[in-house]
Amino acid sequence: MSGRPPTFVVFEGLDGAGKTTIARSVAEAMNAVYMTTPSPRVRAFRDGLLAALGASQEAAQLFYLATVFAASKEVDAHLISGRSVVLDRYFLSTQAYAEFRGSVLRIDEVQRHLRPADITVFLDAPMDVRRPRIALRGESISDRETLNPQADATLRRTHAARAELPVVGRFLAIDAGRLRPDEIVARVLEEIGARHVRET
């Protein structure tokens, strides 16, 4: 994808939808910087920090938002230098999961201070597809809380409610339960190419 302006692509979706696998493959195909929220450095002490914050879902939400703001600054730097970025989770999932877990903070307006994505790819995988994927990688407590019909429906709703926020950019939902990983990667790259055509 050389000769094109740098692109900021975000991957979102429920746990087990395949975000990490697809995001890595797209980043490789684009020769882009691959990032995650939280970053690997923060992830190393995340569990201990969250445990120290206790039962406050608001505190957990603000912690995750801090990692999103840090990522936004890093994305800015890469884009300015001419590098595209593929980010595994950003603002959309941070807010959706916080609401799902009971945070009372409704602070979506802070998104206006973040670098907006050019494209946010929402990998939509049904629970019967997500469940074996999560089991294969090792199921955590936070994974288990999402694997029931009520949680699945609530998380879909909390994501969809924010799909039109400016920080999301173009929202592209892809059926990750029906398509193979290579087909999903091709679909995302096609969308990125179409975006550049529209802007020229």
Image (cartoon, rainbow, N blue to C red):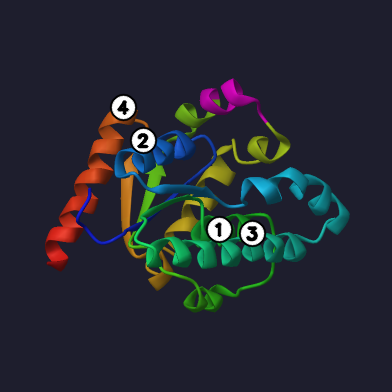
Task: Identify the residue at horizontal 60%, vertical 54% (top origin).
Answer: 97
Q: Is 11 part of what is drawn in magenta?
A: no
Mark 3 is surrounded, within 10 Å at the Cα level, by few (under 14), some (14 to 19) or many (20 or more) other residues, namely: many
Task: Determine the residue located farthest toward the front in the rendered image.
Answer: 81
Other residues around mark 2 within 10 Å, as few (<14) / some (14–19) / many (≥20): many
Callouts 4 and 3 close, C-beta under 8 Å: no
Q: Earlier in the sequence, mark 4 or mark 3?
A: 3
Callout 1 environment at 10 Å: few (<14), some (14 to 19), or many (20+)?
many
Q: CA distance from mark 1 to mark 3?
A: 5 Å
Instruction: Where is residue 112? Give x, y as percent.
Output: 48, 78
Circle 4 or circle 1, nearest the eye: 4
Decide whether the magenta segment is chiefly helix, strand or loop: helix
Of residues 168 and 98, the one drawn nearer to the viewer in this rendering: 168
Q: Which residue is mark 4?
A: 180
Say above or below: 67 vs 143.
Answer: below
Estimate the spatial distance between the alpha carbons at disc 4 and disc 1, rounded to whole Å. Answer: 26 Å
Disc 2 and disc 1: Cα gap in Å?
19 Å
Q: Are marks 1 and 3 in contact (CB under 8 Å)?
A: yes
Residue that numbered label 2 is attached to: 176
User: Gap in Å between the C-alphas at discs 4 and 3?
Assistant: 30 Å
The amino acid at mark 2 is Ala
The image position of residue 77, as x and y in percent, is 47, 65
Residue corresponding to mark 1: 96
Of residues 167 and 173, which is closer to you in this image?
Answer: 167
- The residue that disc 3 covers is 98
Q: Amino acid at mark 3?
A: Ala
In the structure shown, which secondary structural element does the residue marked by tag 3 occupy? helix
Please report whichever mark, 4 or 1, sits nearer to the chain's N-terminal start. Answer: 1
